[in-house]
């Protein structure tokens, strides 16, 4: 068995093998933590119905909230022109508007902060020569994803400002959440690859493609969860393990929407059913992977990581069931979303470290 690692223990070309990259690794993990915070605040913004409170996209001047009563009234008047106010929040007071405005403003402000925390250290490390070549291009690619995420976020909000809309389009919310999750996965993948293992001899069993399959499944489940959140499918079929008395609802319910393809976004029964089924698949696959690793090398780090990942998957499924049974209270909805990011981060670390071992 040979270890596929460079002098620094990093199989990523373009890294300067003679430099200590611990500061870069810490920076990337800080960014990952900020992304998780961003996702958490985004979830709170959605669950409190605050996402449409700011009706304009001003990346620079929008960083300053209203500073006078006249400014607040002007913002409130803009909100009163959109369908959500007329159909859901008619009669809302200025104080109530300030509450929902604060959530959306905080969400956007954290996005600006993440941009600064990303680009300023990136420039610093680049000028010092700590990062260069393909590694620098990889980080720039992650930065480009962040820019795309900001644009998708506004497109999502704009969809909720259309006539007759009281919330954002589910598929755009799912896309927004998925891109954020991919950014998190990229940050963790790169950071985990920077750990110095030059003096470590890894004696781990063959992992195969299982760790990467788990990452793909978790990302798919997060996207499906975004559809559940966007369509509010969690507010119906609030029983488990059955849905309205059936483990598998009849096709007349699952595919009742025309045209057929729209069932996967607009049919609440199918949207929730898909989320349930992929959850079962992830837990089953994670348990099998943990058993496989432990049967090959019970005391190996790979076996411990796989076991921990299976445990996290079970805990996340239990939290999802509780969220459903309690009809999506704020605390449960937020916990479920944040824990999904923890599961994703753990799966990415496992896949990244497992990639260093060749048999």
Image: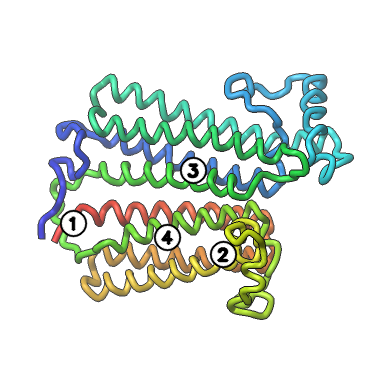
Q: Which residue is mark 4?
A: 217
Decide which of 168, 58 is in the foreground and name it.
168
Q: How far, Cα to Cα, is label 4 from label 3?
A: 16 Å
Measured as percent of width and height from the top left, residue 6 is found at: 14, 43
- Counting other residues with Cα less than 10 Å from the Cα at mark 2, is it few (<14), some (14-19), or many (20 or more)? some
Q: How far, Cα to Cα, is label 4 from label 2?
A: 18 Å
Measured as percent of width and height from the top left, residue 39 is found at: 54, 44
Q: Which residue is mark 1?
A: 357
At a point 22% along the width and 41% down the height, the residue shown is 12
Q: Which residue is mark 3?
A: 180
Measured as percent of width and height from the top left, residue 2 is found at: 10, 56
- Above/below status of 196 relative to 151: below
Instruction: For marks 4 and 1, give the one nearer the viewer.
Output: 4
Tell me which numbered mark, 3 or 2, is placed earlier along the sequence.
3
Instruction: For marks 1 and 2, give the one nearer the viewer.
Output: 1
- Counting other residues with Cα less than 10 Å from the Cα at mark 3, is it few (<14), some (14-19), or many (20 or more)? many
Q: Identify the secondary structure beneath mark 2.
A: helix
Q: Which residue is mark 2?
A: 319
Tell me which numbered mark, 4 or 1, is placed earlier along the sequence.
4
Decide which of 177, 125 is in the foreground and name it.
177
Q: Is residue 210 left or right of residue 88?
A: left
Q: Identify the secondary structure beneath mark 4.
A: helix
Query: Quick check: marks 4 and 3 in contact, CB under 8 Å?
Result: no
């Amino acid at each position: 068995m040979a270890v596929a690692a460079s002098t620094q223990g990093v199989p990523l070309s373009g890294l300067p093998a003679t430099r200590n990259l611990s500061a870069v690794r810490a920076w990337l993990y800080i960014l990952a933590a900020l992304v998780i915070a961003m996702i958490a605040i985004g979830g709170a913004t959605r669950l409190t119905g605050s996402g449409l409170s700011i009706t304009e996209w001003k990346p620079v001047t929008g960083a300053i909230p209203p500073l006078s009563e006249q400014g607040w009234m002007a913002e409130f008047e803009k909100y009163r022109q959109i369908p959500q106010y007329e159909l859901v929040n008619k009669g809302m007071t200025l104080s109530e508007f300030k509450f929902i405005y604060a959530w959306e403003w905080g969400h956007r402000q954290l996005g600006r902060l993440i941009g600064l925390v990303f680009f300023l250290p990136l420039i610093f490390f680049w000028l010092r020569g700590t990062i260069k070549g393909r590694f620098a291009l990889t980080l720039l690619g992650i930065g480009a994803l962040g820019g795309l995420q900001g644009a998708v976020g506004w497109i999502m909000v704009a969809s909720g400002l259309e006539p007759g809309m009281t919330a954002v389009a589910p598929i755009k919310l799912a896309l927004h959440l998925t891109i954020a999750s991919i950014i998190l996965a990229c940050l963790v993948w790169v950071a985990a690859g920077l750990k110095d293992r030059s003096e470590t001899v890894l004696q781990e069993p063959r992992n195969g493609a299982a760790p990467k399959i788990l990452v793909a499944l978790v990302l798919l489940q997060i996207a499906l969860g975004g559809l559940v959140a966007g369509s509010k499918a969690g507010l119906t079929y609030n029983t488990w393990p059955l849905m309205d008395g059936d483990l598998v609802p009849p096709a007349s319910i699952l595919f009742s929407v025309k045209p057929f393809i729209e069932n996967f976004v607009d049919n609440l029964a199918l949207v929730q059913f898909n989320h349930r089924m992929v959850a079962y698949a992830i837990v089953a696959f994670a348990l099998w992977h943990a058993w496989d690793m432990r049967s090959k090398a019970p005391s190996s780090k790979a076996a411990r990581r796989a076991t921990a990942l299976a445990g996290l998957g079970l805990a996340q499924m239990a939290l999802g069931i509780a969220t459903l049974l309690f009809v999506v209270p704020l605390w449960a909805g937020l916990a479920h979303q944040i824990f999904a990011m923890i599961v994703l981060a753990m799966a990415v670390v496992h896949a990244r470290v497992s990639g260093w071992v060749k048999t």
